[in-house]
Amino acid sequence: MDATTVRLILIVLGAILILALYLWERSRGPDEEGLDDGDDEDDAHEAAGPGGREPQGRHADDPDSEDEGDRPQAPAARADAAPDAGVPAPLLLQLSVAKRYGEFPGLDLLEVAESCGLRPGDMDIFHCLDEFDDGTRVYFSMANMVKPGTFPFDDMEGFSTPGVMLFAQLDGRPEDLTILEEMIATARKLATTLGGDVLDETRRPLTVRKEEELRNSVLANEARFARAVRR
């Protein structure tokens, strides 16, 4: 057998092998070729849960389908929602004392604060405390108006601030109105002694009318807590 004949036989055998591979691929059919796509669909149905449906977007052949932005959204949880819906949220009271010109010197502020019953305490701010036999309650506190709101109690001589903020959280106790009156009196004394102005929570001058509104808010808050207890 000469070289030409051998070459011809190899060419024919190669052609037969290629044809056989082609026919085998055709014999697999579309079902076997799409097996991976079917697995993906099964996974999507499993992710949707029993009886659930996979998410669907807008399709070109479905003009009635909705965009994600058109679908009604679930209401977001309120950040200020109380953990226990039966317990009212505390009433937050806030007053500020701002220096008219310049800043309050640290040592002067410390002296007047102590004369008003404010003591350095937790979180590096001042607290007005009511001490009982079985514990201590913070009536109200005083923070620095400048962030982060703390005071350098170890270095008040080199400290100054343009203002301070008095605040309290009231939970409907009988002494809450007394706490408000003490807060107002303390703010007035700080302002008078140190040359400042008393401001409400909107940073406007505290007026007699505003004081009365605060008292009414405290009484209404006490009534809310009383109703919650009776339920």
Image: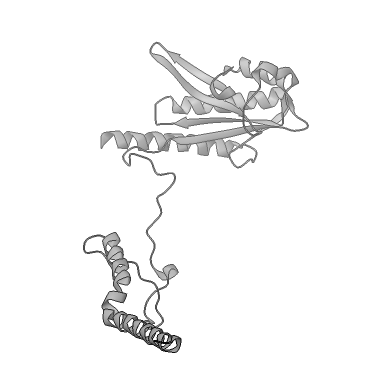
138 relative to 113 in the view: left or right: left
Q: Nearer the viewer, residue 231 or 127?
A: 127
* Coloration of the structure image: one colour
Quarter of the image with the C terminus is top left
User: Residue extending furthest front?
Assistant: 1
Quadrant occupied by the N terminus: bottom left
Query: Could you tell me residue 23's position as x and y percent?
Result: 30, 84
Residue 110, position as x, y percentages in the image: 66, 18
The residue at the point 38 percent across, 66 percent down is 72
Q: Residue at x 40, y 44 (%)?
A: 81
Q: Nearer the viewer, residue 206 or 11?
A: 11
Q: Position of residue 183 (x, y in %)?
A: 55, 27
- Residue 122, x across and y down, in percent: 53, 21
Q: Compared with residue 166, is residue 111 higher up or lower down, i.e. above or below?
A: above
Res 83 quadrant in image: top left
- For residue 98, above or below residue 68: above
Outermost residue on the right side: it is 102
Residue at 53% from the left image edge and 26% from the top image edge: 181
The answer, for residue 125, to whether it is visible in the render is no
Query: Residue 84 sits in which quadrant?
Result: top left
Total number of numbered discs in the rendering: 0
Of 17 and 183, which appears nearest the observer? 17
Furthest residue toward top: 133
**In the displayed structure, does residue 214 sit left or right of residue 101?**
left
Would residue 150 be visible to someone looking at this image?
Answer: yes
